[in-house]
Amino acid sequence: MKEKNLEHLVPMIENIIQRYFLKPVDKQKVNKEHIIIGLGSGGTVAELVKKISTLPNKENFIFIPTSIQIKMIAEKAGLEFTDETKIDNLDLVIDGADQIDHNLNMIKGGGGALFKEKIIMYSSKERIIIADSNKFVNKFNLPIPIEVHPFARSTVTKKLESMRIIGKITKSSQINNRQNKNNGNLKSAIPIIRTNQKGYPFFTENGNIIIDTEFSGIVNIEKAEQEIKSIPGVIEVGLFTRKNNTKYYSVNSEGKFSVKTSASVSSSSSSSSSSSSFFSSN
């Protein structure tokens, strides 16, 4: 199989390296021996890991990978690991996304690592999301990956099939009544068990299945995340809604990139915007 050309990622990766890996650590903010970095999955993260392995100061960082794919690449690159007992001490997580909406909510889980990715993402002090520009959309149009224990396959599937609009607002009875009225005109959700190339069920590294589900509508994404997660048997849902201390790198096919934050502050690739909080500004 022909390898995907990833040359367009080089300027963005070099920018991340300069901002987060080559500047002196602010010892007043990081009072420990190593910076702890969580690693997501995917080709872009893999390329970043390879670049980190060439740094003269790579021994200053230890890593927590979320997938075998990235762990094997990082092992080959000579990076040092720590275990899940250090997740509460994560300084930074670097990951990709399948889709990012106009409010910077994300769909993740295309590679099946959403459970571990959400744990480190929601535990870290800072986050970097790196994605091709075509993954930034006004409104989600991908099915939502839902990791489910195999024992609950049938019950979760039936529950999902009964859902139409998810994340409904309940504070206003007028809005809620309108949502219920519209509900009758919408199709039920379409849950499909993910399979591999041979047609067998896809199993995550945790031994669970993925049910990719298309919903007729999502009113409130944060509420939808909680609503799906509350179904017995659901291990995790591929909606990621926490945005604090997160930078979103958007890169196009020509290598031009921009950086967005939840405060809607953007900077071009030539900008010298503020660096990570655990690095010195000097």
Image: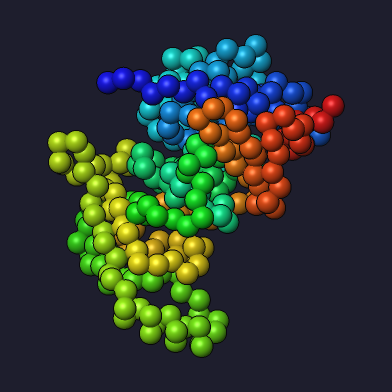
Q: Residue, x 84% and y 27% (percent of image)?
A: 282
Instruction: Using the image as rendered, state which of residue 227 and residue 186 is in the foreground.
Output: 186
Residue 95 visible, this angle: no
Residue occupying the far right of the picture: 282
Relative horizontal placement of residue 2, taking residue 257 as reference (left or right): left
Q: How is the image coloured?
A: rainbow
- The quadrant where residue 186 appears: bottom left
184 is higher (above) or lower (below) than 198: below
Which residue is pictured at 50% across the width and 76% down the height?
A: 169
Q: Position of residue 9 (x, y in %)?
A: 53, 26
Residue 93 versus residue 229 in the image, above or below: above
Q: Residue at x 47, y 57 (%)?
A: 139
Q: Indicate the quadrant containing the N terminus: top left, top right, bottom left or bottom right.
A: top left
Instruction: Judge from the rendering whether residue 83 lies leftward or rightward of residue 205; answer left or right.
Output: right
Q: Position of residue 95 (x, y in %)?
A: 51, 37
Say above or below: 251 vs 110.
above
Q: Residue at x 28, y 53 (%)?
A: 211
Across and down, in percent, residue 260 comes to 64, 44
Instruction: Evaluate whether residue 206 shows in this view.
Output: yes
Q: Hey, which residue is sitting farthest front in the picture?
A: 254
* Image-based side of 119 in relation to 14, left or right: left
Q: Quadrant of residue 57?
A: top right
Where is residue 2 shown, x and y percent of the image? 31, 20
Nearer to the camera, 259 or 32 = 259
